[in-house]
Image (cartoon, grey):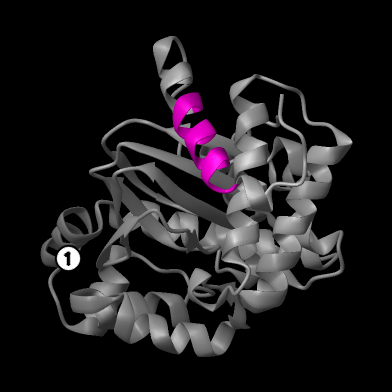
């Protein structure tokens, strides 16, 4: 199983990060998981929740959760226009089928099996369910974000999102919103769990990834479009977060893309504990699982 795609989260908490170039599916299989998306916290129990491209999120009060990261490439190769949409699990009518696919993939993951053609077909089936059933227009979703997720940082986050193509500094944003730099800085650290600079940098990286993967724009044009002083400044900042240059990322395989969130390896008795949970789910869903699981 491609280690960049599927993981089992077993730590209680995970620091704030931003989802880039894809979506993340979370399914708590033991107890609850508490997710904070921008300024809104949500508790999920035995249900699937989707984090979208550019979403800022953190995890706390987790026990055992399946996490599946699917980059935009998976959507594009099946003919879906990924970046025009947001995705929400609330719209999915085939959630039972989606869970069955996840169970089968997770079972092979726990056996440390390599990704095979059958696994790829299952991942593609997951993509089709999400693209066809969970998608909503990006502009409509962004309007909802302002009220549903931005909360007490609504003005700040909305201004930054609308002006991401500009050169945004702590001083320029603070002056525009008539707040002090120190107050703005502390708000991001305390309320978002992410510093102001990292918030801006990762947003610009995400926006640049959209351009990298959907156009033939040069690195110079992309850097100018997003308000960088030079292409070298953009490339250096991109590499500091992504560990590779923008051009290298443009040519990266879908199997080598991963989240900034770094899950812990699943080892020892924890593997068996999770496998028992998965087998219990499989027994529960056996009438819907057509594949033979050995």
Give me the residue at 87% from left, 69% from top.
Answer: 79
On the rendered image, what quadrant is the C terminus found in?
top right
Q: Is residue 273 left or right of residue 249?
A: left
Tell which residue pokes out farthest to the top in this image.
268
Give me the residue at 54% from left, 74% from top.
Answer: 165
The image quarter in which residue 153 lies: bottom left
Q: Main secondary structure of the magenta part?
A: helix
Residue 200: give x, y in percent of width and height. Answer: 41, 61
The image quarter in which residue 251 lies: top right
Camera-side residue: 35 or 188? 35
What residue is pinned by disc 1?
Answer: 181
- As for residue 212 lying within the magenta part, the answer is no
Looking at the image, residue 286 lies above or below residue 204: above
Residue 88 visible in the snapshot: yes
Give me the residue at 41% from left, 12% from top.
Answer: 269
On the rendered image, what quadrant is the N terminus found in?
top right
Task: Tell me the element at label 1.
Answer: helix
Looking at the image, residue 77 lies above or below residue 107: below
Camera-side residue: 77 or 157? 77
Magenta stretch bounds = 275-285
Residue 219: give x, y in percent of width and height. Answer: 74, 57
Q: Is residue 76 left or right of residue 64?
A: right
Q: Is residue 155 left or right of residue 285?
A: left
């Amino acid at each position: 199983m491609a280690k960049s795609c599927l993981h089992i989260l077993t730590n209680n908490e995970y620091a704030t990060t931003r989802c880039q170039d894809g979506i993340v599916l979370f399914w708590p299989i033991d107890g609850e998981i508490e997710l904070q998306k921008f300024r809104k916290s949500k508790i999920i129990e035995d249900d699937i929740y989707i984090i979208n491209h550019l979403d800022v999120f953190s995890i706390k009060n987790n026990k055992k959760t399946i996490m599946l990261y699917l980059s935009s490439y998976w959507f594009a190769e099946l003919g879906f226009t990924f970046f025009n949409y947001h995705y929400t699990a609330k719209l999915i009518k085939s959630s039972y089928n989606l869970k069955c696919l996840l169970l089968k993939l997770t079972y092979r993951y726990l056996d440390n099996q390599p990704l095979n053609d059958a696994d790829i077909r299952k991942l593609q089936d997951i993509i089709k369910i999400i693209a066809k059933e969970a998608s909503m227009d990006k502009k409509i979703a962004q309007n909802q974000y302002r009220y549903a997720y931005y909360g007490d940082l609504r003005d700040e986050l909305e201004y930054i999102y609308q002006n991401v193509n500009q050169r945004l500094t702590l001083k320029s944003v603070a002056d525009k919103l008539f707040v002090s730099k120190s107050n703005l800085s502390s708000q991001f650290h305390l309320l978002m769990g992410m510093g102001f600079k990292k918030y801006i940098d990762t947003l610009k990286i995400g926006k640049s990834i959209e351009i990298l993967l959907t156009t033939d724009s040069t690195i110079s044009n992309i850097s100018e479009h997003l308000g960088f002083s030079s292409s070298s400044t953009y490339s250096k900042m991109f590499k500091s977060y992504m560990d590779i240059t923008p051009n290298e990322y443009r040519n990266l395989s879908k199997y080598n893309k991963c989240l900034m969130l770094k899950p812990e390896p699943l080892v020892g008795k924890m593997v068996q504990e999770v496998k028992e949970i998965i087998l219990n789910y499989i027994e529960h869903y056996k009438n819907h699982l057509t594949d033979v699981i050995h």
